[in-house]
Image (cartoon, grey):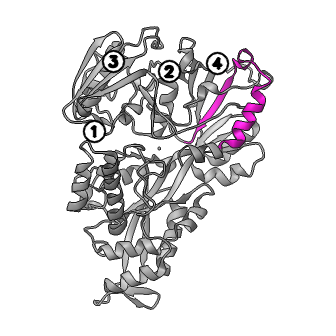
Amino acid sequence: MVRLLDRQYSTWLAGLAALSLLGCAERGERASTDLSDEEKAGGLAVVCYQADIGSLNAFVSPELAAADIQQLLFTPLVLYGESGEYLPYLATEWLWEDDGRRLVLNIRSDVVWHDGTRLGVEDVAWTLRAAADPEYAYWGGGDFLALRDVVVRDSTTIEIGFSEPMVAGLEPFVGLPILPRHLLGDVPAAEFAQAEYHRAPVGSGPFSFAGRRPDGAVMFDRFDDFPQELGRPYLDRIVLRPILEATTILAELETGGTDLCVVGSGLATRAQGSGRLQVVPLEPAQTQVIPLNTRQAPLDDARVRRAISAALRRSEIAAATSPVARAAVSPLPEASPYFDPQFVQPDADRDLASSLLDSAGWREFGDGRRNAQGEELRFTLVAPQGMETSLTVVQAQLRRAGVAMELRQMEWTSYVDLLQSPDDRPAAMALGFAPEKIFNPASDLYSEFHSEGFSNLGSYSSVEVDSLLELLRAPLAADERREIYSEIQRRVADDVPMLFVINVPRLAVVGSRLQGVEVDLNGPFAFAWRWWIAPAQRRVGG
């Protein structure tokens, strides 16, 4: 299931990330030649997040903040590599057996929980069983529906059995936080999601939870017993502050009140205009989408939906939204090895839009279009607050093509209620999707486009697409799997059950004091253990 962006963000592979980080990396490399590891050790960094910080456990929270913070607090089994591979982390080795129905993992023996208890294979086994149990409400539990048994072979080896081949491979294990059985094993499953643990977790990562301040800030201290091989931090403490106002964020970064902020892309122009700040796009980009209600006129006609796509000039929408935004024309993230640039939704083709509307019976009439009954080509789009800029451009572009789009905005909580009420959904809705699967996106596609998919907000139904999505659930040769992904992209481009509008990466905006900042597909805090501040620039107290 894709992660829905929260109200503050209404989750290219290595090449783009490397280019965007060039200035930051050079700065860190120049400074690092002057200081030894011992001299880098110490200090406090203040990081701001453009959202309130509630649950710190990605097991029970689908919000991006919890997924980001996981890299500070927990020790995932594996991490993303740069080229479609997985990197060992808590799991040192793995072996697939029985055609993908059995996975054998070797677990590190030198990781301990922040309370001093050793992390062992029993913790991994308990977490996996909980992830597969719907009562524990793991938001990504669909990835583990096929889990059949978990067997502890010895003190460092675990064997995981599945009732069917695990075609997603190791990707579901990247986002799964391993939890402490000795603290959570006795919590009833029905009460697990509400446990206080999630706000004050005992983890096993490079930083430990150190408390919450009255202003909403969360403190994390360096965990000295974290394995050096996995990256023991330089910083003594990271303070994570929620700051919602863009003006305040920039002022804090400029004056050194904060050292790094994870923000939406709307701040890119102002941040890039500063000579003191580094702007680092966070990939994979989040995608602004507009699901179209395929059961409601006039969008029940695929020609109309395709014409609407062709009437959009996505580069113009992106430029109006953020300097780091870019056109989105496919359901697959650009970082996925299955992204096929041949099969994209029509874009910036007014002639195609006009021809399709003519063929669908919508003739030009004044500055709009009407059908044979004299009805105006009009539909309503409902969106959460915060997406005004891009959607206003969409509205203007459609008007130029003779399509009237009424734009209505809703408060986030009410909007979520509407999302969950299929019978009440309007002709179109707008929201942001953060891709959950990069290397194996089949589950995301199933959720969005299968007739029974959870995130199929346009009530799209295609026997052919359903069949293709079902095929992706079985073991396939690499070439065959690639062909199926391409065919799904082609059909979605033709049918347009969901408009893909723009890709909008979040940003890590870095102040002049913080050194060693790098990011990758694992998130903004994946390399927080490398961050450091020169002794002369460190804060007093904390």
Estimate the spatial distance between the alpha carbons at disc 2 and disc 3, rounded to whole Å.
17 Å
Q: Mark 3 points at which residue?
A: 184
Q: Is residue 507 visible?
A: no
**Residue 24's quadrant in the figure?**
top right
Q: Where is residue 153 in the image (x, y as percent from the top left)?
A: 27, 13
Task: Name which of mark 2 and mark 3 comes first in the sequence.
Answer: 3
Quick one: label 1 or label 3, which is nearer the N terminus? 1
N-terminal label among 4 and 3? 3
Asked if residue 134 is positioned above or below residue 308 in the image, the reply reads above
Residue, x 41% and y 91% (percent of image)? Answer: 365
Magenta span of residues: 21-50
> Residue 118 in the image: x percent, y percent?
42, 9
Query: Helix, strand or loop at disc 2?
Result: loop
- Packing grade of label 4 (10 A; few <14, some 14-19, many >=20) is some
> Label for residue 76?
none
Q: Could you tell me how far apart the alpha carbons at marks 4 and 2 are, in whole angstroms?
A: 14 Å
The label number, if any, that marks residue 205 in the structure image = 2
Q: Where is residue 34 in the image (x, y as percent from the top left)?
A: 80, 24
Q: Residues within 10 Å of mark 2 (few under 14, many from 20)?
A: many
Foreground tag (4 vs 2): 2
Q: Mark 4 points at which residue?
A: 236
Pick whichever, 507 or 146, lies toward us. 146
Q: How crowded is mark 1: few (under 14 residues within 10 Å), some or many (20 or more)?
A: some
Question: Mark 3 and mark 1 in contact (Cβ < 8 Å)?
Answer: no
Tag 4 near tag 2, CB within 8 Å: no
The residue depicted at 56 percent of the width and 66 percent of the height is 315
Helix, strand or loop at disc 4?
loop
Q: In this view, does 345 lie to the left or right of 280?
A: left
In percent of the image, x 32 and y 64: which residue is there? 491
Amino acid under disc 3: Leu
- Kindly state the secondary structure of the residue where label 1 is placed: helix
